[in-house]
Image (cartoon, rainbow, N blue to C red):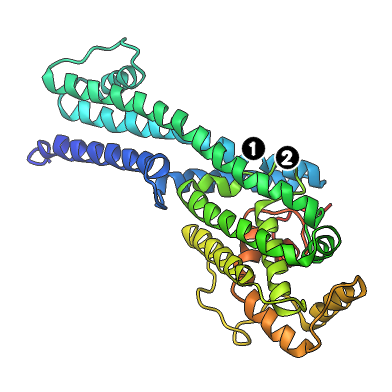
Amino acid sequence: MLSLAPSIPILVFLAGAALVIVTIASAVSTFVLPRSARSTITTVVFRQLRRAFYVRASWAKTYDERDGVMAYYAPLALMLLLPVWYALLGLGYAMLYWSLGYGTPIDSLRLSGSSLFTLGFEAPKGPWTSLLAVSEAMLGLIMVALLIAYLPTMYSAFARREQAVNMLEVRAGTPPSAVEMLQRFRRIHGLERLGDYWRTWEIWFADIEESHTTLAALVFFRSPRPELSWITAAGTVLDTAALTLSAIDVPYEVSAALCIRAGYLALRRIANYFQIPNPQEPHFPEDTISIGRAEFDSTLDGLQANGLPIKPDREQAWLDFAGWRVNYDRTLTTLAEFVMAPYASWSSDRMSPNAPRIGSN
């Protein structure tokens, strides 16, 4: 044992340095890196807090109460990251100080806390501990600055997302519905104006793909109004485009196809970031969809009764619709379950019966 004693400070120093480096890497990947990168620390914080919120949400009896509980989840988890990083940095630096011979472990923790928060009640001794104390104080300030700079960027992306979601309500109702959207477009704008709308939402899908993987907390930020959600809005637009291409008797619009492709790629990449299983290259009929043929025919009957031109070949319309829908069906319904989305037809209403849904009383 005595022969191993000299190696203990070295091991403690290496462990402390590793803890500091891992913590810095977590902050950089969460706040700075302009690409999707998972952080173990961030994942653990969000996952453990999510479990607690699931328990609390399960006690709620009404839609408003459950949504109100979950509205606090993402902001609280985000704010909790800073004290977690501080605690890990403080522990890592305390291990470094102790390994360099700075008194007892308690003395090292006091110096680490004094340096990290720039309180100055404990002074370092020697050039190496002084150098470490300066670096720790600098990192403590950088962590706060990163969070302050991060929040405006995130809320700017949130505002862009929610503007489109709110505007969709005018055209697709509440909860949003592809059927309602087609009917309102025919009455108000004319179906020929749908082309401009697909281009707008193609840009929106590209935006959420980038923002919801680099600023992953946005996935859990709920809309200001509890009955709205970014994922149900996405599903409504995708279904409207799929119905238009497959069953509505209007000239083929390539922008609708591009909108669907942008949409399912965005949803897949968000699901992949969170390691949610979803088919990457699905094909119908090998891969099924959650919409049945009878439900599809009933939807077309309703659209036709309200004056929309329906293609006469229902069999081909069904195959075309299923061919489009299969690209995003599983991913859409899984993400709706993942974010506990409010009720909407053909998206969150397809969640598994045991999912912690908050969209209905």
User: Mark 1 falls on what kind of element?
Assistant: loop
Mark 2–mark 1 CB contact (< 8 Å): yes
Q: Is residue 251 left or right of residue 215?
A: right
Q: Which residue is labeled 2 in the image?
A: 68
Q: Is residue 6 left or right of residue 165?
A: left
Residue 41 position (above or below residue 311)? above
Q: Position of residue 223 (x, y in %)?
A: 68, 44
Compute the Cα span from label 2 to label 1: 7 Å
Q: Which residue is labeled 1 in the image?
A: 72
Q: Position of residue 258 (x, y in %)?
A: 57, 68
Q: Quadrant of residue 75?
A: top right
User: Mark 2 falls on what kind of element?
Assistant: helix
- Near mark 1 (Cα within 10 A), the count class, few <14, some 14-19 or many ≥20, is some
Q: Is residue 107 left or right of residue 332?
A: left
Which residue is pictured at 63% across the width and 65% down the height? 332
Residue 104 position (above or below residue 88)? above
Q: Quadrant of residue 25?
A: top left
Which residue is pictured at 67% across the width and 40% down the height? 71
Residue 87 position (above or below residue 204)? above
**82 vs 237, nearest the viewer:** 237
Three-letter code for the amino acid on which mark 1 is drawn:
Tyr
Q: Position of residue 179 (x, y in %)?
A: 81, 66
**246 vs 267, nearest the viewer:** 246
Three-letter code for the amino acid on which mark 2 is drawn:
Gly
Which residue is pictured at 78% across the width and 41% down the height? 65
Q: Position of residue 21 (x, y in %)?
A: 27, 40
Toward the top, the furthest residue is 121
